Amino acid sequence: MLAVGCDDILTVYLDGVKWSLRSGETDVWKQTSIIGVTESTKILAFHCKDNSGGYGLIASVEVKMWNGERVVYTATGVNTGWRCSGAEESGWEKPGFQETSNWKQPIKGNNGDLNVLNGIAKQADAIWWKSSSRNVFCRKEINIESFVKSMYTF
């Protein structure tokens, strides 16, 4: 399960496919969007646009294990493998995208209220590109299938 929030306007892509969010989820920064992801999902990508004031993008993916336990697979944060840019590049949201020098480790977002959104793992922290940027494009390559298999290795 992917849980994501953005201050202010959110667009979500899974493996390059734009995800349709419910009305009110795209432009209400206090709203968490909950999206089912499969083990085959390889790329999480988000475009977040800040209109004014605080800024930030926050997300986590939790995997439900065979015993019902929910395990955090990944969460946004400064040192968590997420890569962000302030510029939209062709194919940035798709698998196989080759990052240019525009893609960097994110900085900490500037909206502490995002850190308490319902459904987001407590390990997650808001991220951003540069404090002067109004747009951020963030992506992360994931491998849930391998993660799940590793949890069952004895």
Image (cartoon, rainbow, N blue to C red):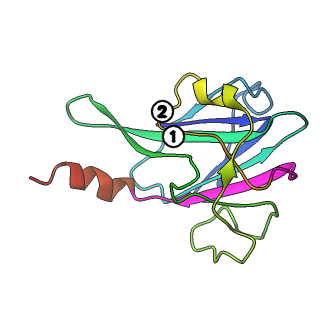
> Is 94 above or below relative to 114?
below
In the rendered structure, are the residues bearing label 1 and label 2 in contact, judged by CB atoms less than 8 Å apart? Answer: yes
- Which residue carries the number 2 mark? 121
Counting from the top left corner in percent of width and height, residue 40 is at 42, 56
Q: Given the current orientation, which residue lies at the most extreme left position? A: 154
> Is 116 above or below relative to 48?
above
Q: Considering depth in this image, is 127 or 68 the residue closer to the camera? A: 127
Q: Please name the residue shown 68% across and 30% down the image.
A: 112
Dot 1 falls on a residue whose secondary structure is strand
Q: Given the current orientation, which residue lies at the most extreme right position? A: 52
Q: Please name the residue shown 57% across and 68% down the image.
A: 95
Counting from the top left corner in percent of width and height, residue 19 is at 66, 44
Q: Please name the residue shown 62% across and 39% down the image.
A: 58
Answer with the quarter of the image where residue 70 lies: top left
Answer with the quarter of the image where residue 129 lies: bottom right
- Which residue carries the number 1 mark? 60
Region in magenta: 131-143
Q: Is tag 1's residue or tag 2's residue first in the polypeptide sequence?
A: 1
Numbered label tally: 2
Q: Considering depth in this image, is 43 or 72 the residue closer to the camera? A: 72
Q: Residues within 10 Å of mark 1 (few under 14, many from 20)?
A: many
Q: In this image, 44 relative to 53: left or right?
A: left
The amino acid type of the residue labelled 2 equals: Ala
Q: Please name the residue shown 80% across and 31% down the image.
A: 27
Counting from the top left corner in percent of width and height, residue 24 is at 77, 24
Q: Considering depth in this image, is 59 or 33 the residue closer to the camera? A: 59
> Is 89 above or below relative to 59?
below
Q: Residues within 10 Å of mark 2 (few under 14, many from 20)?
A: many
140 in magenta = yes
The amino acid type of the residue labelled 1 equals: Ser
Q: In this image, 42 relative to 65: left or right?
A: right
